[in-house]
Image (cartoon, grey):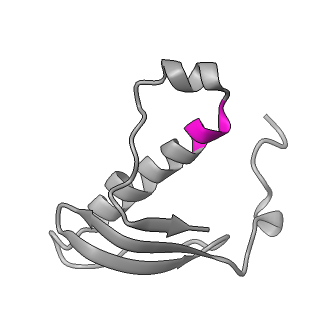
Amino acid sequence: MPGRFPHPATAPTGGVLRIRGARCHNLRALDLDLPLGRIIGLCGPSGSGKSSLAMDLLAVEGRYRYLLALGLEERAESRHWEEAPVDRIEG
């Protein structure tokens, strides 16, 4: 479906996704700034929270923001309504 996703050259850049107080599994009060419009990698030893950050925090936040963009009826029918375990996410 052309036009559905922004071309990498037009994706927002220069901003950051600010995560404050992330907590799930091995993440304890993590504060993190991730650049927008950039490809990033998560590195660290086994058990350090890489998957928790990607799947339990960022993916949940993405679903939450998607649901907020839907109409009220679609939101009411959704069974996936959960917020990421953080104090604050901006950006």
Q: Can residue 58 be seen in this view?
A: yes
Location of residue 69 by image quarter: top right
Q: Which of 19 and 44 is in front in this view?
A: 19
Q: Position of residue 55 (x, y in %)?
A: 35, 53
Relative to 51, does residue 69 appear above or below in the rendering? above
Q: Where is residue 63 in the image (x, y as percent from the top left)?
A: 50, 42
Location of residue 66 by image quarter: top right
In the image, which residues are magenta?
66-70
Q: In this view, does 36 lie to the left or right of 82?
A: right
Q: Can residue 41 be seen in this view?
A: no
Residue 68 falls within the magenta-colored stretch: yes
Quadrant location of the N terminus in the rendered image: top right
Location of residue 24 by image quarter: bottom left
Q: Is residue 13 left or right of residue 17?
A: right
Relative to 33, does residue 10 appear above or below in the rendering? above
Tally the marks. Answer: 0
Relative to 65, does residue 28 appear above or below in the rendering? below
Residue depicted at x 17% and y 68%: 26
Q: Nearer the viewer, residue 9 or 14?
A: 14
Quadrant location of the C terminus in the rendered image: bottom right
Q: Position of residue 3 (x, y in %)?
A: 84, 43
Q: In this view, does 37 lie to the left or right of 27?
A: right
Residue depicted at x 26% and y 79%: 44
Q: Which of 43 and 36 is in front in this view?
A: 36
Residue depicted at x 24% and y 68%: 49
Q: Where is residue 8 in the image (x, y as percent from the top left)?
A: 76, 64
Type of secondary structure dominating the magenta stretch: helix
Residue depicted at x 50% and y 18%: 77
Residue 60 falls within the magenta-colored stretch: no
Relative to 72, does residue 35 appear above or below in the rendering? below
